[in-house]
Image (cartoon, rainbow, N blue to C red):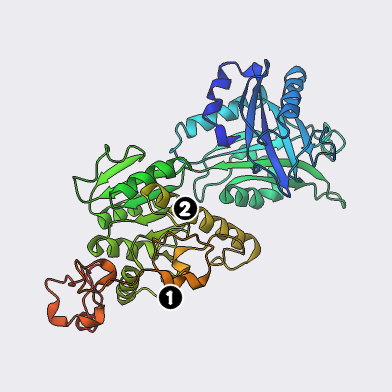
Amino acid sequence: MLDRIHEYATCLDEPERWAIATVVEVSGSVPRPAGTSMAVRDDARTIGSVSGGCVEGAVVDAALTCLETGEASLHSFGYADDDGLSVGLMCGGDVRVLVQPVREIEGALREALELAPTADAPGVAIVRELPIGADARGDADAAGTPRPAPLAVAFSPAAGAALPDAVRRVVDHAGPRVEAAVRAGAAHVVDVTDRRTPECPVVRRLLVETRTPAARVIVYGANDYSAALARAAATLDRRVTVCDARPVFATRERHPGAHEVVLMDPAEHFDRELAAGRIDARTAIVVLTHDPRFDLPVLDRALRRGLAYVGAMGSRVTHEKREQELRAGGLGDVELAALHSPIGLDLGARTPAEVAVSILAELVLVEATARRAAATGADPRSTGPGLPRRLRDTEGAVHDARPASASASAETTRPAVRSSTAGPRSCASAPSAASITPTAVVAGIHPLGSALATADLLTKGAPAWT
């Protein structure tokens, strides 16, 4: 329900006319995750969708019945039969959907909207009671104590905060599992059993939903790529910030898709956001500045924080130099393994819009891989067979026009790296760090543009940007 909480504000104008259907449990291949919801009015007008079309009609019918009876109900939908005439999921999965009149949860809805009035407001959680049938729940518990009305409570899931009294009174020994569900986010079902009898029957089933603020994508470096990335990331419900120290580039006009554009030194901005608690484990950092004076301080800070994603644009030669300098600054193999550079998936992207898709596709892949690793213990660095390769795991020119599936033999047809004597020098043809003498270091700035010095500085301690 919290997935569309702000759209449901209109339902509170006429709460008696609306019911809300929420996916509470899923298994197998399903189109939408638990927590997906849809509101239905008594004239069959709808807000949202619970399955992308497979069972929408049946859910609308269930909601209309719910409004007639005034009672919540739980409905299960599995695989449709062979002729496709039965109501079900053609994808082969199973879903359970709670249909509940808004009247029954009106107070919790209003409280949730007060706690999170906007999409970027602090998080909010709702605990609701699922119907489990008269035989299981009855009108009284095993001791004969009358049961209260179905639970529906909204609260702020602040770190370390205790569950509301209304929730603690009913969860009993299941309290730690409810708290864990709140911390995990999304939607989870928690069973409360009666331990006073040998059978330990389930006496309550609670749907725990948590909505956190939109995950952030912070882009350091304002250019055509950052403008395209801001537009694309916003469509993924990310809160996008673009930061650059150059006033001519860090403008709202150049970045209409960004939620905010900040004129500030990137390292100072990162420190400010970190101190304010606005950078967390879900934050993605994308560095597009192409200037080591700005790149290195941000990457050094970000890679020490265990963020969801840290990526940097640049050629393979640029990446190698960058990695050398970050190692000299104190980062090890574990931290550097989290750096996605060259950035993006191997999709053959060339234009700013295509590169934005490549970067965001890698971000989605990294997040999905991390979730799978947390659930199964798999290696979080393994993307699995059949998936696009990350550019950092490939070889050759980054902006290669050939399809990603081309054979390895195509490597020999790629353009050779340009010689430093063949016209203007690119970053790919810059001399190696080993070829620069310590005497070339002036005011702490490496001739390659690096804020790290050569071997002379490496023997004197950490670089100034750490």
Q: Nearer the viewer, residue 201 or 306?
A: 306
Residue 178 seen by the camera:
yes
The x, y position of residue 301, in whole percent, is 34, 63
Residue 466 seen by the camera:
no
Q: Tell me the kind of residue under disc 1.
A: Asp
Q: Is residue 267 left or right of residue 208?
A: left
Q: Nearer the viewer, residue 154 or 366?
A: 366
Quadrant in the picture for the C terminus:
bottom left
219 to 23, vertically: above or below: below
Q: Secondary structure at mark 1?
A: helix
Upstream in sequence: badge 1 or badge 2? 2
Which residue is under mark 2? 282
* Quarter location, residue 103: top right
Q: Secondary structure at mark 2?
A: loop
276 to 344, vertically: above or below: above
Label placed on residue 346: none
Q: Nearer the viewer, mark 1 or mark 2?
A: 1
Say which residue appears at 48% left-offset and 34% top-offset. Answer: 116
* Quarter location, residue 135: top right
Marker count (numbered): 2
The x, y position of residue 179, in whole percent, is 61, 49
Q: Nearer the viewer, residue 79 or 389?
A: 389
Quadrant in the picture for the N terminus:
top right
Which residue is under mark 1? 333
The extreme front residue here reads 413
Q: Badge 1: how crowded within 10 Å, few (<14), some, or many (20+)? A: few
